[in-house]
Every structure is written in C-alpha cells, then in structure tokens.
Image (tube, rainbow, N blue to C red):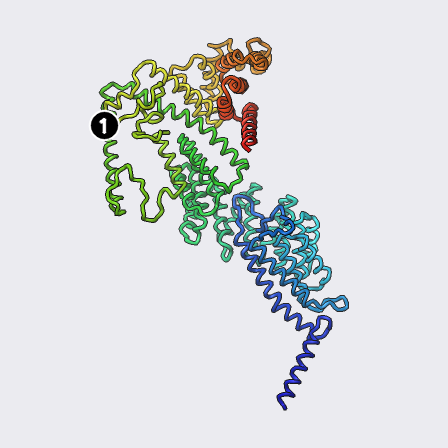
Amino acid sequence: MKKILYSFIFLTSLFFAISSCSTKKDTFISRNTHAMSTKYNVLFNGNNVFDEAKQQLDDTYEDNFWERLPIEPLKIEEEEIIPMPGQTITKSTEAQGFDKSEEKAVKAIQKHSMVIDELERNKQIDEAYLLLGKSRYYSQRFIPALEAFTFAINKYPNANLFNETRIWKAKTHVRLKNEELAIRTLDLVLKSIDLPDEEYEEAHTAMAMAYTLLDSTQHIINHLKRSTLYFADKSQSARNLFILGQIYREEKQIDSSNMVFETLSYMKKIPQKYKVHAVLERAKNYNAADSTDLTIYALHELIDNRDNRPYLDELYYQAGLISQKKDSLAYAYDFYEKSIRYNTKKPVQKSLSYEKLGDLYFDDTKFEMAGAYYDSVLQIKELDQYSKRIRKIVRKRESLNSVIFYENIVKRNDSILYLADMPEEHQKEFFQAYVEDLKARDEAEKLKNEIAAMNSGGGIVDNANNNLPNNNSGKFYFYNVQLVGLGKQQFKNSYGNRPLADFWILSQGGGAFATNTGKKQDDNLLTDESRYDVASYIKTIPTSEEAIDSIKSQRNDAYYNLGLVYKEQFKEYEMAAVDFENFLNNDPTKNLILPTKYHLFKTYANFNTELSNKYKEDIVNNYPESRYAQIIKSPKSVSNLKNDENSPEKIYKGAYICFEENDNEYALSTVNDAIDKFKGMEIEAKFELLKAFLLFRTTGEEAFKEKLNFIIINYPNTVESKHAKQVLEELKNNKEKVNN
C-alpha cells in the first residue's frame, strides 16, 4: 500500500514539474530547465558540429602564398547554383556540417525560446541566434545570416554576446560589399567599455577586412597591427601578422617587412605553415646587404626538419632563387630540380620551378631542354591558361621552335662541313674512334640486358625484346610521365628526330652525317654488316662542290634567322650579334649583307657603342644611297621618301592593287623581290602577310597556314602577327562548325 502511495506522489510531482516547465510560464523552474537544456544539450551538440565543420574548412583551404593572403580564409563561390524543380545539388562536406549546426540552432530557438510579455526569458537563445548566423555565414548564405544577427541584436541588447554578434554582422556586411556600414558598426564596438581581448582582436580584424575592399592601405596596416596586440586567437593573429609583412613589402618598407617575418619565424604555438612561410618570405626580401650564408642556413634548417616535408618544394625553390642571384648556377639547377621532385599537390609551385629551369637552360643556350621545361609548365591543367604569365610562356615556347630549328641546322651543317674539310686519314681516325665507342656501348647494353633477364628469371633477352614487361613491381621509369618526357627530350638533344627504322642512329634527319642534298633516305641507312665498317661512314660525307655549297648556304640562312629571332623576339642582343657576325663571316648572301649590317648597328647600340658606330659609318660611307643610310642620317626625313616610286610603301601599294585585281603571279613576284630588298625593315611583315594570302590563292590552305604561323613567330608584337592569329582562329572555328 505504501509503495502505491509513493508511486502516486512521485508521478504527481513529475507531472507538476513537467507542466511547470512550459515555455509559456515564467517560473524559476521553467527558465532554468529550458536554459540548461538549451546550453548543455542542443547548443552543446550544435557548437561541436560547427567547430568540426569549421576545422575541416580551415584544413581544406589552400592558401596561395605567392599572393597577398586574404584576411579570412574563406573561399567565396561567385555564383550560387539554383536547382531546377526535382533537381538536387550535392553540397560539400563543409556545407553539410554547417547545415547540421544550423538545424541545432533552429531547434534550440523553436523548442526552448520563452518569449513572455515580449521579453525573452531563456538567457541562452541569443547564443542560438549567434550560432544560427555563423552557420549561415560559412554556408555563404549571407542575407539569411544578416537577418539572424540583426534579430539577435535588436531583441537581446543586454546579452553577453551582444558585441560579438555585432562583429559578425559587420563581417557579413563586408561580404555583401557594404563596407562603410560595417566600419560604422565596428567603430561602435571598439568604443565599448571593457571589451574582451578576443573581441578586440576580432573587431580590428574585421575592420581590416572592410578597409581591404576600400583599398585603404594605411588603415589596413593600422588595424592589423592592433589586432595582433594580444594574440588571443593565435591562428588568426599569426595570419594577420603575416599579411602585415606582405603589405610592408608591397609598400617598399623592406626593413619593417623583414622585422615582421623574423618575429613570426621565432614564434611558438602558431600554425607551422606561417612559421615556414615567414622564413620563405624573409628570403624573398633577400638583397645584396643580406648574408647569403645565413639565409641559406635558415632554409636548410627548415629542410632538415621532418615536420616541414610538405613545404620542401617551396624551400628548395627559394634556395634556388638565392643561388641564382649569387650566380651559383650549379646549385640553382640542383635546388630547382629538388623542388620539382618533392612537389606534392601545388601546381603553382611546380610550374614556377619548371619555368625557372627552362629560363636557366635558355640562358645557357640549351633551347631544346628549355622547351621541354616550358612544355611541362603548359601541361599543368590546374593553372589559369589565360593568365598573363602563362600566355607569355606560350609565346616564348612558340618562338623557341624556330630557335631550335635553326640551331639544329647550324650544329648539323657545321659538323658536316667539319668532317668534309678533314683529310681522309683524319676521317678514318675519327670514325674508327666512333666505331670502337659504338662497340663498347653495344657490349655494355647486351651485358645489362643479360643481367636484367637473369634477375627477373626470364633467361637471356636480346636487344629486340628488351622492352618486355617485368613482373617485378616498383617505380618503373615509364610510369613517370615527367621522366619519360625529359628522356625523350634528352634523346632528341643527342640524336635529333629519327624515323622508326633499323639503324636509326645513321638515318637521315639528325646527327653529324645527315644532309639535305636530295638523296633518298634509304641511301643513308647502313646495313647490319656495315655498322662497324669505317668506310661505310666515310661514304656518307658529301664531297661534291654543289652539295657542300648547299649545306653552307643553309647554315648561313640559319645564322641570319637566328640573329633576327634573338634580336626581335627575345631581346638577347649579344646572342643576336654573334649570329649576325657569323653570317657575315661565312660567304653571306649578297642581298642580305646590308640588312645584316643595319641589324648589327641597331643590336650593338644596346651594349657596345663602339661597334655600333663602326657599322653606322660602314653603312653611311659604303652605301650612301641606300634607304638604311638615309634612315641613319635623318630618321625624320624617312617619311618624305614614302612618295618615292621605289619606296617600299609604293611597291607594297602596287602589289596590293595587283592582288585585288587577281593578278596573283605578278603580285607574288613583286612581293618576293620586295621581301629580299627590304629585309629587316618594319614593312617586311606587311609583305609577308600579303604573300600569305597570295599563297592561299596559288598554292592552297596548308601553305597559307604555314606562312601565317611563320609571321606569328618571326614578327611578334606587330599588327600583322595579331591579324595572322585572328585568321588562324577563324579557320579553326569554321572547320569545327563544318565537322559538327
């Protein structure tokens, strides 16, 4: 009986307790019960979910340290996808996490809000609205976030989180490009009495964000400095300090920038990425007054730390830059190659390392290797292919094609002429040494294949089958695309472009024995029996005067064209001068002697005034009636010569009239004569473009496209080059329309 009585009393008490916890009754039990349930149940779970989503967002955010960092690490999607009826949009895991925290905040408001007599009796609801707004903010739904913050500020002016909510509202205004309204809000916050350190930092950080939109550098600096006074939020404060160092460098305040980065590099308990990049940024400020040894030592100290393995590519790259500045090119090559080797998931850094190696090989006149590294840059799909930097590399790579082509002609033909000038006994000695070396290499290759076959358990494998797959797993050479690409380029460096045929090393198209004398390719292929026969090699050397003259003429044309490319496209005036001089010293084509001397006059003017004056006097004294002499003596009077019947302008106009009247043969003949006569002058590109359209009528589309590409490469930064690009693009688009 007593048990029944106790049960009844307990149930009655429980009933009254539950009924007294109604959100409509302003009782002590109701207020505290709902406040406790809100704080330790719904909001506790909501804040945990929010913190996890925020941590994941920070971990997945990739900073671009090659530019000034944004103050808040949040990637804003420019366009929001609006789903069609019945369509679902897959959200990122970060957005899903913030959606869950938003659900918890809404649940806390709906189930535990106690608005009685227009006053909120649950002291935790302001925190629910703050969580609601923050969740919407990181989901990039800024208008709903602004509504949540505004409601909380208006309804709970005496809440503990009042100032923090105002800061978040100001940040939301910044995201909505209402920076002036944000600044007014933050001014009110900063005037508050007894503002906690955390909120002081947050307010100044948000103020710096607002002034970034206004591009007010000094205000950004002032607020970033104040935001780092207390270092309450170590991650954000370290970021603010890092950005401050970057801004000082932009403002040419290098000493202040160095001080900031050095301070960061010695700090503890901040994210490692800021410490490492502080050292890197300090190294970027390197100048002649700095100690090279100390800078390199600081980089090596970080390299030796295993915790910094994710940053090895950037560390080696920076070490390469400093080595290059100090003309330690061997170290620079090594550091850049290591930067590529240790790169993980940083396409920008990889492209920079490839580009620097390409530049080094270009400066060393190893153009094919330079081209290979530029190709590697262009193969990185993550890069913006329309950026100014990439477009510059594309133009440089296209120009390198002509350099490589003419350089190969010079090297090949010089080798042939060198062998042709040898006495017969020296030729025998030369090829005997070559045959002995060939035998040694063949034996070494055979031994290598036999050892590999025995190690794999497959018996002896001959050269014809040495590319059979091996069952052993590992980092096989041909699984690495970059290594294969470089291997192919090194093969071309040594042997040129070879056909897929037996005894390719002796085939036409590359090497010291290839010629363009009109012989069939099969005539140059040596049989298996003659592979080690010295006499067979000697037979491949041209002996007729006609063949040798053809090789010399081809080489001299290559010298002239190389000089033009170096002078006009790459501004490598010293290299251009060398090739122009080589052209003049090797039985030059008569109609190109005067243009070449004029080019040398202009080229030497950039680095050797004495030699420039020498060619100036030569042209004026020995060719006084030429157009080049008139240009040198009186540049302003050249415009008066345009009315002369023999002026290039008049000749071009006559050729163009013939083109319009479909007198193609006469127009083409006139253009060809003019190109030879006015070689090296600005109007040359106009004649070449007119010739391209004449070739389209007389020869066909392939010759037309080939000539347009020739104009693009050899006359860059001209109106004619731009027009040639447009025409090629139109041809491509028309072809695609036809195919579709």
669 over 56 or under it: above or below: above
Q: Please give the residue where the numbered disc 1 appears in the rendered image.
A: 529
Q: Is residue 218 left or right of residue 154?
A: left
**Which image quadrant: the C terminus?**
top right
Is 307 left or right of 197, judged from the image as shown? left
* Above or below, comparing residue 68 to residue 670 in the picture: below
Residue 494 screen position, x and y as percent: 34, 31
Residue 437, how many percent across, how many down? 25, 31
Label 1: which secondary element: loop
Q: Nearer the viewer, residue 629 or 522?
A: 522
Q: Is residue 188 visible?
A: yes
Q: In the rendered view, does 294 fall on the left or right side of 231? A: left
The residue lying at 32 percent from left, 21 percent from top is 416
- Quadrant, the N terminus: bottom right
Q: Residue 583: percent from the left, percent from the top? A: 41, 18
Residue nearest the observer in this picture, 595 or 232: 595
Few, some or many residues within 10 Å of mark 1 (<14, 14–19, 20+):
few
Name the residue type under label 1.
Answer: Glu
Percent coordinates x, y for residue 366 in the rendering? 39, 31
Q: Could you tell me which residue is drawn at 56 percent across and 58 percent down?
A: 53
Q: Extreme right residue here?
A: 117
Residue 605 appears in view: no
Question: Between 450 and 275, which is closer to the camera in this rendering?
Answer: 450
